[in-house]
Image (cartoon, grey):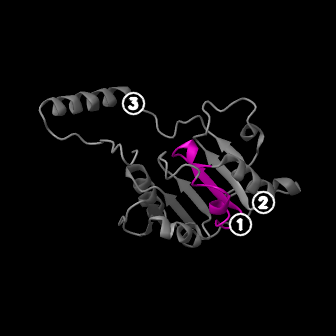
Amino acid sequence: MIGTPFRKPRHRWQPEALPARERYAVGVAGLGVIGSAIAVELVRQGFAVRGHARSRKQIEGVDCRAGDDEWSSFLDGLDVLVSVLPATRATHGRLDRPALERLARGAHVVNVGRGATLVEADLLALLDTGHLGGATLDVFASEPLPPDHPFWSRREIVITPHVAAETELAPAIEQVADKLARWSRGESVSGGVDRARGY
């Protein structure tokens, strides 16, 4: 796993050297509001950041790629892949074996988008071969995660119960009330969903 401070399998307490952040390639798949914020923070922390979205984005310090033609080049050699992809027909199973095999050997996969975007069997297979070093998963194909799911017993996988972000009740109520008021006055409302795109 990333930044492991000692060699547990060898029963040795030996610090491991961490790579320089500027040479550590982190990719953010999905550059909406959340993905863009993640990318900006990673840049602030000094990482080499790539981003990918359906349409072209411009984020300072981020090497932004777009569309199917640039998907493979986005993935190539990433040390960490952070997925914030929405669940659409186009993204279903997007993180499959061919995609994950393009990551650097020992790479770490983070999925805080939607469970249907990741082919779970392919992730497990690449952990078994050692091509992937680990994963941090907040979303799953089936939720809640079934008790007999292999993710529970894999030491290389950190799982969280779909709580990448918690909703604060009071601000949420205020936001909904404001949107209803704007809508009733015929004004534009932010955060709308494009049914054709699926998000």
Label 2, label 1: how far apart the Cα atoms are: 7 Å
The label shown at residue 105 is: 1
Q: CA distance from mark 3 to mark 2?
A: 40 Å
Circle nearer the viewer, 3 or 2? 2
Q: Nearer the viewer, residue 96 or 104?
A: 96
Count of labels shown? 3
Taking depth in this image into account, of 1 and 92 the one nearest to the observer is 92
Q: Which stretch appears magenta?
A: 94-118
Mark 3: amino acid: Glu
* Relative to 25, 158 lies left or right: right
| Residue positioned 30% across, 41% down in the render | 192
Q: Amino acid at mark 2?
A: Gly
| Mark 2 / mark 1, whichever is N-terminal | 1
The amino acid type, in three-letter code, at marker 1 is Arg
Kindly check if marks 3 and 1 are in contact, taking CB atoms under 8 A apart as contact. no
Q: Is residue 146 above or below residue 134?
A: above
Residue corresponding to mark 3: 168
Residue linked to disc 2: 130
Q: Residue at the spot x=64%, y=67% of the render?
A: 102
* Image depth: mark 3 or mark 1 in front: 1
